[in-house]
Image (tube, rainbow, N blue to C red):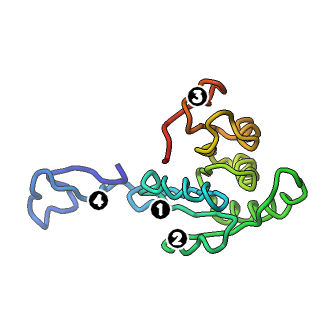
């Protein structure tokens, strides 16, 4: 995994003598220098952002680019690239235009293999445009939705590759997957 191979001897290290059994070394496969796979992890501020941050252990070994509607959230993830986008309301459709433009620019620059979002309406453009860019998409509906799928989640389930919920009750009711809760 990750370009490592297990070997006692390799033709290229004869000059160093035999290696100790069980020792790991970089593989001679050409993909061992391949960069980490990149994902975009997106959430609006508040609880959605907290939920996304709780998923960080799942992102280990990946090149993660964070996106949020609150610019100050960049201080929480200082070792990663961060972009802020304007906030939007599902009640005012025209507020999505600047987000669409910004999402297009971010996805074109970063070229992720996947987009993961913990929901909220401002992140819907990322799910839609990521599909157009050929990236996989995962919508994780908010843990606050314990009775029904959120309005944004109802839209996302039609465009995301996977839409999951954090409540077994909602999963059964909506016919969606439940992988657990982040809280």
Q: Mark 3 and mark 4: span between their CA atoms? A: 46 Å
Q: Residues within 10 Å of mark 1 (few under 14, many from 20)?
A: few
- How far apart, in angstroms, are the residues tagged by discs 2 and 3? 32 Å
The residue singled out by tag 3 in the image is 169
Seen in the picture, residue 19 relative to 77 is either above or below; the reply is above
* Foreground tag (2 vs 3): 3
Residue 76's label in the rendered image is: 2
Pointer 3 or 4: first along the chain: 4
Query: At 75% from the left edge and 51% from the top edge, which residue is drawn?
Result: 121
First-in-chain label (2 vs 1): 1
Secondary structure state at the residue bearing disc 3: helix
- Label 1 vs 4, first from the N-terminus: 4
Residue 35's mark?
1
Which of the 4 quarters of the picture holds residue 49?
Answer: bottom right
Label 3: how many residues lie within 10 Å, few (<14), some (14-19) or many (20+)? some
Identify the mark nearer the N-term, 2 or 3.
2
Mark 2 element type:
helix
Spot occupied by residue 84 in the image (x, y as percentages of width and height): 68, 69
Contact (CB < 8 A) between labels 2 and 1? Answer: no
Nearest to viewer (mark 3 / mark 4): 3
The residues tagged by marks 1 and 3 sit, at their Cα atoms, a distance apart of 40 Å
Q: How far separated are the C-alphas under marks 2 and 4?
A: 33 Å
Given this view, does label 2 or label 1 mark the residue nearer the observer? Answer: 2
Left or right position of 91 against 119: right
Question: In the rendered image of this protein, does residue 154 appear above or below residue 44?
Answer: above
In primary-sequence order, the first of circles 2 and 4 is 4
| Label annotation for residue 26 | 4
């Amino acid at each position: 995994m990750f370009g490592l191979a297990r070997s006692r001897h390799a033709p290229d290290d004869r000059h160093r003598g035999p290696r100790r059994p069980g020792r790991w070394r970089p593989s001679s496969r050409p993909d061992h220098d391949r960069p980490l796979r990149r994902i975009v992890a997106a959430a609006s501020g508040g609880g959605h952002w907290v939920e996304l941050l709780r998923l960080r252990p799942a992102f280990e070994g990946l090149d993660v680019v964070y996106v949020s509607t609150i610019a100050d959230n960049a201080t929480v993830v200082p070792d990663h690239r961060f972009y802020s986008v304007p906030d939007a309301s599902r009640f005012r459709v025209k507020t999505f235009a600047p987000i669409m433009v910004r999402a297009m620019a971010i996805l074109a620059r970063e070229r992720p293999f996947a987009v993961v979002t913990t929901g909220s309406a401002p992140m819907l453009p990322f799910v839609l445009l990521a599909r157009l860019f050929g990236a996989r998409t995962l919508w994780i509906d908010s843990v606050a939705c314990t009775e029904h799928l959120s309005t944004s989640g109802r839209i996302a389930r039609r465009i995301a590759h996977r839409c999951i919920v954090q409540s077994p009750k909602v999963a059964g009711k909506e016919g969606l997957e439940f992988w657990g809760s982040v809280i």
